[in-house]
Image (spheres, rainbow, N blue to C red):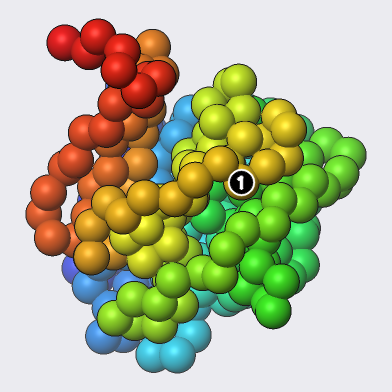
Amino acid sequence: MRLSETARRWKIRKSDDDQLIASFQAVSGIDTYPLTIYRGVAVVSFFSGRSGWAVAYRQDGKTANIANDFVFKVFHDGNFMAFDTGEGAKVLDIDSWTIKKFPGENVVGFHDGKLIGVDRSAKPAVRIIGIADRQTQVIPVPEWKWGAGGMSVCCAKMTDDGLLMVDSAGTIYALDATSGTFVREFLATSDEITGMEFSEDRRFFATFATDGFIRIWAVVPEGANVR
């Protein structure tokens, strides 16, 4: 799928045969739109002054209103797309084309059908919410750190065996989601972390920060032979 613009009208087309999927008029004063494409679905986030909204377009022409508010983050895994919005978390099932709502949840990650949210109250914690049954696991953590823009929790990443990394203003909280415990914390950078990723063998962990650096960390027992 691709997005193009002609005379302030935007069009979403299929890449293989150039078939038109959707078309919309540009909002006055807005020239570009954040766009996420995943498994034949294009999600466009619109911004106009203090208003925001998001719409999903599927290759068969179906549309879905994701949010009538700003979309801050977009995640995708398997058959789902998850959104952190001003209305709480939203999850789009791509096949059934249905949306589940999780009001009040602040989502910073998504893995294997589970939302990874954060509780910024007086009892800071990470919340892992199953999108199928809505069962919630709460893991207490130390107080969230403060960055240049205030209390900052930007992203999280989890492995299949339950190792969970959560950013807090450049400090990484390592959690064990299987036992529901906090393991340790370490300072990755004094700048905001915008992304994380594990290597396929889970031996290494990368962080991406606003200072322009990608940092690689070894996720192995202390003293192990790492090449």
The N terminus sits in image quarter: top left
Residue 74 in view of the camera? no
Q: Residue at x 76, y 52 (%)?
A: 138
Q: Residue at x 19, y 40 (%)?
A: 215
Q: Secondary structure at mark 1?
A: strand
* Lateral position of residue 57 relative to residue 46, left or right: right
Residue 226's spot in the image, x, y percent?
22, 13
Looking at the image, which is closer to me, 165 or 31?
165
Residue 143 in view of the camera? yes
Residue 57's spot in the image, x, y percent?
52, 46
* Lateral position of residue 80 relative to residue 109, left or right: right
* Lateral position of residue 73 relative to residue 87, left or right: left
* Lateral position of residue 95 relative to residue 205, left or right: right
Residue 123's spot in the image, x, y percent?
71, 71
Q: Residue at x 40, y 83 (%)?
A: 150
Question: Which residue reaches farthest left?
Answer: 212
Residue 83 vertical position relative to residue 15 in the rendered view, above or below: below
